[in-house]
Image: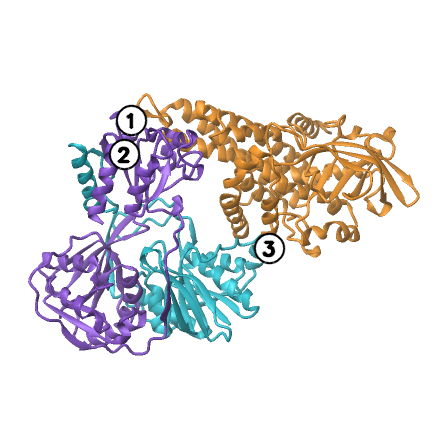
Chain colours: A purple, B cyan, C orange
């Protein structure tokens, strides 16, 4: 009875969430197998997977798996694992993971837990913690049947670092079955501006920017994070930013995961527009600025100095 | 062209979550119930498909306690033709159990298209849609923002959103299931005439026994908890280079927002 | 005595209108208030969703909504914007005279078209020299063969600039006072009608208010609603039906003002604590809540009485509802601005608009003073 991690990869690279899963299992001393699917061209990435702590890597290879498909993955994984008595099947709660795991679990006739932020395994069972009600609370789920099937939220657990390879991956025949839903075209993302009210991350500039041109500093930082750019009412009134960028009482109300306020004092009008942000960062030269009272993290400093350095720091992380 | 839309009644997004004393769930006494917002997009898409083809019916189905009937009536008021209520008082959360019941009811309707929202905003599982498609043995596409039905109505192309903002155009034969995302359409209001008419519409009711479903949960849940209190903010020390690096690290490792 | 619960349908109606207001009205309310632009598209959308002309009976293809449903609808709309509410609600006011006093043929001819197209109608009673003393109106309707010829002018007419139909109250003989009044349906395109400029009002700026002048305007006698001399009674009955919803609009506006105040007082800190901790603020909020609830119940009671067919009781309760709701809403709005302090006095915050909008409710559809006259008359009659 083994624990199986379904690896995810794209463009020849393993997705970090796969390494996070392997890392967490290793930390808990749980032996894990890794399963990777792909066409023949995925052989190198399957090999690289052997360096991340799995006891064994199984490569389900088929030209039909060169392209991801819901049924291809669910069918092939089920066909293989149903011969292995899996105790648990895990994957990242990514676009792909959320897509095939339910069909896979249905084939095993068990329930599943999605987007888990913690897992605790003993030799024979798992308990997982997952957010519900849009993250307003969490619950713990235990599995009454095997396999225990669950997906894990990316970027929550520490990734496994590279170690010695466990040897060449074991190749197993990939029974993809009949794939009815196939991707026939990929549409590149549009370059249109993310709407502030929909953005996950917003970096806003205040009147301290002193000119419309200086907003470039904010834009460069935002570009690294894929963030949207906002502005305070004062900056808009001074002509440094357009009104559609305004966050606040007479602008937009936003609730991103991360809100970074640069050179914004934190007047009540601005706060009204962003106070429900999950994490608030403030950068301001004035240590008494009201915004620091609402910020989770603060840097007392000059934004012209701090923001470019932040841009560099973010670049190193991404 | 028969379309079945699965919908779920969930607590309103503004609901203040209170955990029960025994941590087995949330307090449900004072809650305002709504149609899962993602399912509203599905209902609208079903209505648009029917209107576009000028033929077919839209049937909505939900599983849950008696209060769910209100959600069905709202869907009828929006324009759905029929409604099915699978009575289930325990509010099961195991997607396998839920899908068994839904697929049993849906099978009787023999639809060409099954629609639902990509996830329910209470459990956020995003799983039931895949389970239902598997149990019905039909192809499925999730996180769909556009559906185009083929000219002979035997197949469809759906645009699916993936990470990074790209979209995959997925082709599949019908019958098929599509789990839709916000942005696919703008749901219409339940018009006042619709609301008045909905009261008189008959709703088909099934029990789990009627559908031959054994509600044996394969998972148990417990230990509901509120997330830790928002800590007082910290001012990061050091010179600017240090502050910047430290902030980036904290945002990634502690706050986990980048 | 039955319980105070609304029915499932009424709750669905309330929820639907609340959503419409949340998504479609509130985001644009301040814009229309500032620009005075007429909210054409919004009115069309309200019509498309069945929010207008609800009073038209089912037998003519309408929804046959009672006054209670209208009250529920208007509270939700009023919480969004009173100006927009007035623009949408006034169709009922203009069409009720025909529904209450007209023949089935007249209803089919004049009212049913409003169910088929998003058209507007205006109720034309008030004149430059007759407001509260509505019976003293002087717009004159002279018989001329098969027609009436109308001469005179009306004032403060809602939707005048956009209506396709006017319900006009005129007199055939000034000496008969209110007993000489007739109700005539006048199409907008009749010759001799000229419409004044959009009045620049203190509030409810999204509502179109104008003077209308009639110069030898001819309408066929078939446009006479009810009998000669019966017009005033039709006007009064109409106002009884629309007074509860109008009052309810004020209840909604007051509710919005209170909700803004509650939110703000929790966030605004002075003396190291949210101002919500101070009894001075708490007492204002408590009084707001009490008065809003009382106003709402008076509106429900009035609507209930009218829907049951008791026009006498309905008239009495309508006056109570209108008088109380308008006056309490005014106080609530003033207190809301007070709670917001300096910020409340600026257009950046939503409460000064409510204060400006609500003032009109104390004036139109019968001033608060006239309501008191009506109430006292009921109390003192033998």
Taking the view exactly as shown, the residue that stands out farthest to the top is C271
Chain hosting mark 2: A
Q: Identify the secondary structure beneath mark 3.
A: helix
Structural crowding at the residue carrying mark 1, measured as other residues with C-alpha within 10 Å and reported as few (<14), some (14–19) or many (≥20): some
Chain hosting mark 3: B
Position of C72 with respect to A150 (left or right) is right
User: Residue B193, labelled with which disc?
Assistant: 3
Position of B149 with respect to C310 (left or right) is left
User: Residue A289, labelled with which disc?
Assistant: 1
* Earlier residue among tags 1 and 2: 2
Callout 1 touching callout 2 (CB < 8 Å):
yes
> Marks 1 and 2, how far apart in space?
9 Å
Check the image and report above or below for B111 versus B198: below
Residues beneath discs 1 and 2 located on the same chain: yes
User: Residue A282, labelled with which disc?
Assistant: 2
| Residue C76 point in image, percent of width and height | 54, 42
Q: How many marks?
A: 3
Residues beneath discs 3 and 2 located on the same chain: no
Position of A146 with respect to B54 (left or right) is left
């Amino acid at each position: 009875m083994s624990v199986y991690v379904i690896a995810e990869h794209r463009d020849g690279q393993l997705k970090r969430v796969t390494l996070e899963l392997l890392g967490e299992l290793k930390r808990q001393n749980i032996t894990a197998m890794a399963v990777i699917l792909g066409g023949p061209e995925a052989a190198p990435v399957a090999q690289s997977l052997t360096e991340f702590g799995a006891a064994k890597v199984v490569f389900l290879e088929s030209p039909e798996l060169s392209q991801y498909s819901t049924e291809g993955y669910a069918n092939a994984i089920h066909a293989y694992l149903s011969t292995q008595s899996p105790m648990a099947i895990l994957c990242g709660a990514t676009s792909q993971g959320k897509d095939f795991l339910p069909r896979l679990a249905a084939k095993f006739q068990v329930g599943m837990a999605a987007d888990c932020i913690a897992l605790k395994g003993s030799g024979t069972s798992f308990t997982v913690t997952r957010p519900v009600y849009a993250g307003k609370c969490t619950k713990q789920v235990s599995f009454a049947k095997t396999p225990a099937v669950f997906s894990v939220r990316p970027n929550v657990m520490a990734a496994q670092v590279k170690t010695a390879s466990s040897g060449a991956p074991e190749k197993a025949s990939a029974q993809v079955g009949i794939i009815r839903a196939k991707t026939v075209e990929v549409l590149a993302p549009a370059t249109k501006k993310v709407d502030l009210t929909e953005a996950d991350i917003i970096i806003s500039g205040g009147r301290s920017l002193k000119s419309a041109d200086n907003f470039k500093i904010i834009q460069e930082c935002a570009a690294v994070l894929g963030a949207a750019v906002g502005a305070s009412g004062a900056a808009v009134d001074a002509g440094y930013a357009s009104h559609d960028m305004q966050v606040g009482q007479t602008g937009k109300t936003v609730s991103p995961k991360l809100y970074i306020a640069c050179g914004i004092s934190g007047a009540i009008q601005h706060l009204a527009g962003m106070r429900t942000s999950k994490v608030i960062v403030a950068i301001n030269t004035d240590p008494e600025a009201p915004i620091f009272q609402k910020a989770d993290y603060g840097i007392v400093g000059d934004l012209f100095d701090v923001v470019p350095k932040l841009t560099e720091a973010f670049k190193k992380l991404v | 062209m028969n379309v079945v839309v699965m919908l779920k009644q969930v607590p309103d997004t503004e609901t203040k979550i209170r955990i029960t004393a025994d941590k087995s769930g949330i307090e449900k006494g004072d809650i305002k119930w709504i149609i899962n917002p993602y399912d509203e997009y599905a209902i609208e898409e079903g209505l648009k498909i029917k209107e576009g083809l000028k033929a077919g019916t839209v049937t909505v189905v939900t599983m849950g306690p008696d209060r769910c009937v209100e959600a069905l009536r709202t869907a009828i008021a929006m324009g759905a033709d029929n409604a099915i209520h699978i009575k289930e008082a325990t509010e099961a959360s195991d997607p396998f159990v839920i899908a068994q019941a839904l697929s049993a009811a849906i099978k009787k309707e023999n639809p060409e298209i099954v629609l639902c929202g990509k996830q329910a905003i209470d459990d956020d599982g995003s799983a039931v849609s895949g389970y239902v498609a598997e149990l019905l043995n039909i192809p499925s596409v999730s996180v769909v923002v556009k559906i185009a039905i083929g000219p002979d109505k035997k197949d469809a192309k759906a645009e699916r959103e993936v990470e990074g903002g790209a979209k995959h155009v997925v082709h599949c034969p019908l019958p098929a299931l599509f789990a839709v995302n916000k942005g696919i359409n703008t749901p219409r209001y339940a018009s006042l005439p619709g609301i008045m008419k909905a009261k008189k519409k008959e709703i088909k009711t099934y029990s789990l026994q009627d559908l031959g479903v054994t509600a044996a949960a394969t998972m148990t849940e417990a230990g509901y908890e509120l997330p830790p209190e928002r800590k007082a903010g910290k001012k990061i020390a050091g010179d600017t280079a240090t502050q910047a690096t430290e902030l980036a690290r904290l945002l990634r490792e502690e706050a986990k927002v980048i | 005595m039955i319980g105070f619960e609304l029915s499932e349908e009424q709750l669905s109606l309330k929820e639907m209108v609340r959503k419409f207001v949340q998504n479609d009205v509130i985001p644009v309310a301040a814009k229309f208030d500032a620009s005075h632009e007429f909210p054409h598209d919004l009115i069309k959308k309200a019509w498309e969703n069945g929010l207008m002309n609800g009073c038209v009976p089912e037998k003519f293809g309408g929804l046959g909504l009672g006054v209670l449903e209208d009250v529920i609808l208007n509270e939700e709309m009023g919480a969004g914007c009173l100006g927009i509410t007035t623009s949408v609600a006034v169709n009922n006011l203009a069409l009720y005279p025909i529904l209450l006093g007209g023949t089935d043929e007249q209803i089919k001819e004049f009212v049913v078209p409003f169910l088929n197209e998003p058209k507007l109608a205006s109720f034309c009673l008030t004149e430059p020299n007759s407001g509260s003393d509505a019976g003293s109106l002087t717009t004159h309707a002279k018989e001329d063969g098969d027609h009436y010829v109308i001469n005179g002018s009306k004032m403060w007419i809602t939707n005048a600039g956009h209506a396709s139909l006017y319900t006009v109250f005129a007199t055939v003989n000034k000496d008969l006072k209110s007993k000489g009044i007739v109700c005539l349906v006048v199409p907008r395109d009749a010759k001799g009608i000229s419409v004044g400029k959009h009045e620049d009002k203190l509030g409810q700026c999204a509502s179109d208010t104008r003077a209308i002048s009639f110069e030898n305007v001819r309408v066929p006698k078939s446009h006479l609603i009810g009998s000669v001399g019966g017009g005033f009674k039709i006007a009064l009955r109409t106002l009884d039906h629309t007074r509860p919803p109008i009052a309810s609009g004020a209840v909604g506006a007051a509710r919005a003002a209170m909700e803004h105040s509650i939110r703000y007082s929790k966030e605004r800190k002075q003396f190291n604590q949210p101002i919500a901790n101070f009894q001075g603020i708490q007492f204002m909020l408590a009084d707001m809540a009490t008065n809003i609830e009382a106003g709402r119940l008076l509106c429900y009671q009035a609507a209930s009485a009218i829907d049951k067919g008791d026009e006498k009781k309905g008239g009495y309760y309508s006056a109570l509802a209108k008088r109380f709701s308008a006056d309490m809403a005014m106080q609530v709005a003033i207190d809301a601005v007070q709670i917001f302090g300096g910020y409340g006095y600026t257009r950046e915050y939503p409460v000064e608009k409510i204060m400006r909008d609500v003032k009109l409710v104390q004036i139109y559809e019968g001033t608060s003073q006239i309501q008191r006259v009506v109430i006292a008359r009921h109390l003192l009659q033998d």
